[in-house]
Image (spheres, coloured by chain):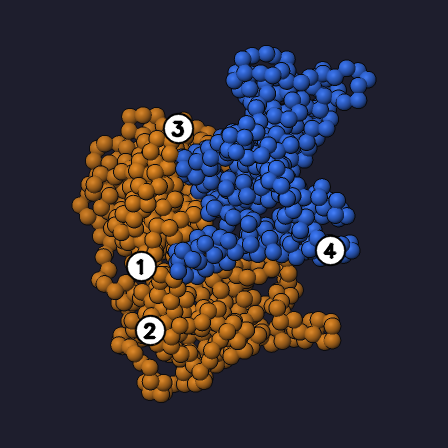
Chain colours: A orange, B blue
Amino acid sequence: MIEAIPTIDGAAPRPASAPIVQVIGLTKRFPGVVANDGVNLTVRRGTIHAIVGENGAGKSTLMKTLYGMHRPDEGTIAVNGKHVHFKSPADAIAAGIGMVHQHFMLADNFTVLENIVLGSEPRTGLALDFVGARRKLAEISTSYGLDLEPDALVEDLGVGDRQRVEIAKVLYRGATTLILDEPTAVLVPQEVDELFGNLAELKSEGLTVIFISHKLDEVRRVADSITVIRRGTTVGTADPNSVTARQLAEMMVGSELPTLETRDSTVTDEVVLGVEDLTVLLPTGRPVVDSVSFQVRRGEVVGIAGVEGNGQSELVETIMGLHELAAGTLRFGAEDMTGWSTRQRRESGVGFIPEDRQRQGMLLDAPLWENRILGNQTRPPAVKGIFIDRSAARKDCARIMQEYDVRAPGCDTLAVALSGGNQQKLIVGREMSGNPKLLIAAHPTRGVDVGAQAAIWELLKDARSAGLAIILVSADLDELIGLSDTLYVMLRGRLVAQLDPADVTPEQLGIHMTGAAA
Amino acid sequence: MNLVRRVGLTLFAPTLALIVALVISAIVILAIGESPLVALRELFNFGDSSASQIQAVTVILNRAIPLFLAGLAVSIGFRMGLFNIGVEGQYRLATIMAAWVGSAIVLPAPLHLLLIVVVAMAVGAIWAGIAGVLKVTRGVSEVISTIMLNFIAIGLASYLLTGPFRGTPEGSLTIATEDLPESGRLASLNGLLGQLGLAQPRTDLSGFLIPAIVVGVVVAVVVKRTRFGFDLRASGLNPAAATTSGVNAKGMVVKAMLISGGLAGLIGLPDLLGDTYHYGTEFTSGLGFLGIAVALLGRNNPLGIAFGALLFGFLDRAALSLQFAGIPSQVVTIIQGTIVLAVVIANEVARRIAIRQAERSGANLPTAGPPAGEQPATVAT
């Protein structure tokens, strides 16, 4: 079960193996923020140790400190029982600690072998010793079951293969403790299984893996021990065999989780959006949205399920006016909005949470208050006549930060500095602030942590009760079933099924999504 | 702490760049066997009498005014990620058209001036607008089209000058349009200098100084404080997000090119209205390209562009006195070139540092100067 920390004493509880990495009282401050505050962590040799926590809880800061990317303000790090002071990642690598970043750092036009030796090129005299490197890579590849083809070009590799190249790169440099930063975030389920197989190999060879994640089920599957971080500090360690995902989530969030139960229906008869025979063509002339018709009423959440790439994105983007439609009409209340510009739609009360928040929803290099204005350029309080009302925009940004629990130092912070969950909460707050009549939410909780997810669900439910019409596109089937009043399945551009979320299971929904039901 | 950091980061890049540029220039001057100290002395040698000092300042300002306008024109495009390389052609064509219209018509003074300004801005805007329309309808890169339009504009201006617009008689040595009548000329500010009790410079201080400052203020307000300016900057920072937020991306490209070209149309007017009164073969060229450098120096910020223009004017002034001291005037061009390179590199480095710090800490840090940033840029001291 859940033990209370601190378990600082290195000697005792599990005699299985000695601690290879031990962190005591680690504190790291940045201007305005304490990113890590008294973190304690004990990782034992030959284990897979998971670090879980919400986005922005301080996991990455801790790992970057361990990897020598920045230096702690307080506290100690011991590797193999010896105190270390890393000045750079090179020091960490020398001490046997390597890191596989979430975003791969590979040169696409190089081969696997070239990528692996890049930065620590083996030399004989002036020439590169590729023969020796190749032999070493082959050893690594076979002994850890990485199955790498040294001469393949990286650009031809899939995501899972690239990740294995990154792992091999770290092993090539002699690391015996590997830090993996959210390794499963980019993988499909089969690749996750393969990765876990690789990790087991590493473990059986006596290597240590530190695994960062917020996917609790995966963590329970793969880890030998779990440490939970909340708001910059370690709040406990848990045994994956006995802890439930829900208990872990509660440790992460620090409170009882709200459940995703549908409340009483608030659906009215008043149609807010009418989509009739909507067809959108790709440049090739193939329909990506094919004669889609549906209605969204006041107080109703219409969920759209589907395997990604079946036209959901194009459908909602067309409703926002971002694509030209080849046929069909869009009615907004009593009006025909087919020919409206995106701005007219927004002004009339359509809010949009885009699926790719950083690409479509944010100005990353701009401060939060300017991001507050984005999408509201023609509406108060952000503007006054033709001018931007800076003080009102700042004030309203502060309101959103407070009401929607956006954790950031202030409204002048650049958006790029926020974690994904906090960026998303800002977007939700912004899109809700114009009192929209219709909200289009595309993957509103993708990539956000449990706490932010629960908060966003609550917001959507409250808004629905208040009479908002919502279109919800999501890949999270529980979310779809839990929030929707009406559920459609989209397949190859068509709505192929209408289901009642009250009595459909994720499995049944999955069958419809893959077209197996027909 | 925060304020110190902010100011420090903002000043750090340009100051460092200036020092680096001066060191490189000193090495070049040493390499050609001259003394960098003499060059430095000549740069700051404004003469002994107050009259010659006023004269020096006037020369600097007269050079800086068109450079400032050119920098503004370029910066509008840069703000939304458009590279208007065609400012050169836009102002040359605008100036000759304005000169011709202005000399062909006689109106009461204010109206006459206004007409010339409107013609110049309209021609510049239309010429730049061609590139904008080509971009949104046919997907032609504005870099390519504006460069090509430069050649066409310069060729067209030459044809018009030697043909239909020629105002000097056949066989005369100068080829120019007819001079503007009195009502189309702009008074110099020498009278104002006199009223301030200052000595009269030998050269007229261009009366366009005041309109240029007004234009600078208007551009600053439009870019930073208006909805339009927000849309413009948003389009530059993240085109996809701007479109999603309701900005009409295509309309924005055309509008930005029109404004950029309209501003470019003003570049030749200080000389036309206050100095030469005609467009001719010897009319100042190259201002459009220098404008790109000035906009880079000023990080697209009107105040920064003003500094950049003044710095270039300051360096250009020294060209003559450097020659008197036996140092080739091309040294000035070398200094200008190294400053631009150093500033661009330093800005990028400072921007990366700032972004990295912001990402790492989630702390309250300013951008040290992305191309579309909005901190006041102090380029030179």
Q: State left or right for residue B65 relative to residue A19.
A: right
The N terminus of chain B - image quarter: bottom left
Q: What's the distance in space between the residues labelled 2 and 3, CA to CA?
A: 55 Å
Residue drawn at 37 percent across, 48 percent down: A368
Mark 3 touching mark 4, by CB under 8 A? no
- Are both tags, 3 and 4, on one chain? no
The residue where tag 4 is placed is: B35
The kind of residue tagged 2 is Gly
- Which residue is disc 2 drawn over? A38
Disc 4 marks which amino acid?
Ser
Q: Chain of mark 3?
A: A
- The residue tagged 1 is A450
Near mark 4 (Cα within 10 A), the count class, few <14, some 14-19 or many ≥20, is: some
Q: Chain of mark 4?
A: B
What is the distance, in whole Å, between disc 2 and disc 4 at their CAs?
Answer: 60 Å
**Residue B211 disc label:** none
Question: Hey, what amino acid is under mark 3?
Answer: Trp
Front position in the image: B362 or A269? B362
* Figure label count: 4
The image shows residue A83 at horizontal and vertical percentages of 44, 82
Q: Nearer the viewer, mark 2 or mark 3?
A: 2
Q: Is residue A155 above or below residue A363?
A: below
Viewer-nearest residue: A289 or B326: B326
CA gap between label 1 and label 4 equals: 68 Å
